[in-house]
Structure formats: C-alpha cells, structure tokens
Image (cartoon, helix red, strand yellow):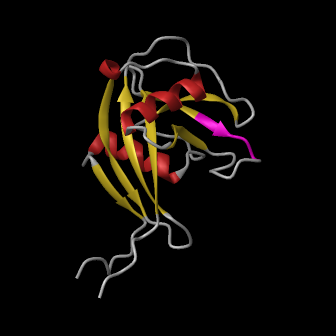
Amino acid sequence: MSKAPHPLIADVAQILLQANGAVLCVRRKPNTDLAPGQLTVVGGHLERSEPLDRVARREAKEETGVRISADQQEFGGLVHHHKPEGMDRITAVFVAQSWTGAPHNAEPDKHERLFWVPMEKPPPDCHPYTVAIFHMLTHGPSYRALNWPTSGGAR
C-alpha cells in the first residue's frame, strides 16, 4: 500500500556571521504571518528553478541589501521541523562571514529593524527555530529534527 507524499515547505536561512559570533537577525512586524515580533534569521522560501544556495544569497540581498558571492557562502546544515497542525519545513542553512555592502533593513514593510544577536546567548525574543539553528551551528550536528514526536516514523 502506497502512502501519499507528505506536504513540505523548503526554506533557506542565510546567516550573516561577524567574527565576534554575532548573527544578523530581523524583527518581523506584528502584521506578518511568520514569527510576528520575534527575532529570526535572514531567509525565505525557494522559488521555482532556484538552487538553495542562490535562494539564500537572494534573500540576504532582499532583506538586508548585502551581496554575497558563492565563494563567500558555506553550507551550515539542515533543519527538518515538524509542525503537526500544518506543513513540515526543511531549511537549508548557509553561513557568510563576509559580504559586500552595509546591512540595512531593506524590507521595512516586513521588518521593524535589524539586530546583531550573539549566537551563543540569543535573547529570549528569538524565535525557537532561530535558537535551534544557532545551537546547530555552534554545537552540531549539522542536521536537526525539531518538534518530532518521540515515536513513529519509518517502520
């Protein structure tokens, strides 16, 4: 007996990391549907015919105005987040420690402002998903399964 494919959303996170371990985050405006009022990393959804690394660079430019080349970007890991009441998400995480341009709030209609957040000690208003990404990057492993029930899965 064959099962129907599980609905899934694919996202990317582009981590702009300073030498002191601070990551650039955005505070989403209350009228947005994703983590309103919480700090989240730069990122977004894939568009048709777009590879993951390119999406991450595009999102960084759209949200913060910086340009990141493929050479400045490294793959950081993968997060698979289970959402019982909606679609599951897989997020590919990329890290850049250098870029061109000064980061600024390039989407003021979506974000209140930008913040440099210490990855080792994020503030309490960081979205739990963002905190999990920070933990993955600082402590490993490079794959995280979040919010999954302890039983179930493949038999």
Residue occupying the far front of the picture: 49
Q: Is residue 63 left or right of residue 72?
A: right
Residue occupying the far top of the picture: 101
Position of the N terminus by quadrant: bottom left
> Closest to the observer: 89 or 5?
5
Residue sitting at 34 percent across and 19 percent down?
A: 72
Asked if residue 122 is among those painted magenta in the image, a careful observer would answer: no
Q: Quadrant of residue 153?
A: bottom left
Say how many tags the image has.
0
Residue sitting at 36 percent across and 30 percent down?
A: 95
Give the image location of residue 22, x and y in percent: 45, 27
Residue sitting at 41 percent across and 31 percent down?
A: 54
Position of the C terminus by quadrant: bottom left
Q: Is residue 72 left or right of residue 26?
A: left
> Closest to the observer: 87 or 128?
87
Give the image location of residue 145, x and y in percent: 34, 60
Residue sitting at 42 percent across and 21 percent down?
A: 18
Q: Quadrant of residue 40?
A: top right
Q: Magenta residues?
A: 26-30
Q: Main secondary structure of the magenta part?
A: strand
Q: Is residue 95 left or right of residue 43?
A: left
Residue occupying the far bottom of the picture: 1
Q: Is residue 119 left or right of residue 66?
A: left
Give the image location of residue 80, x and y in percent: 38, 58
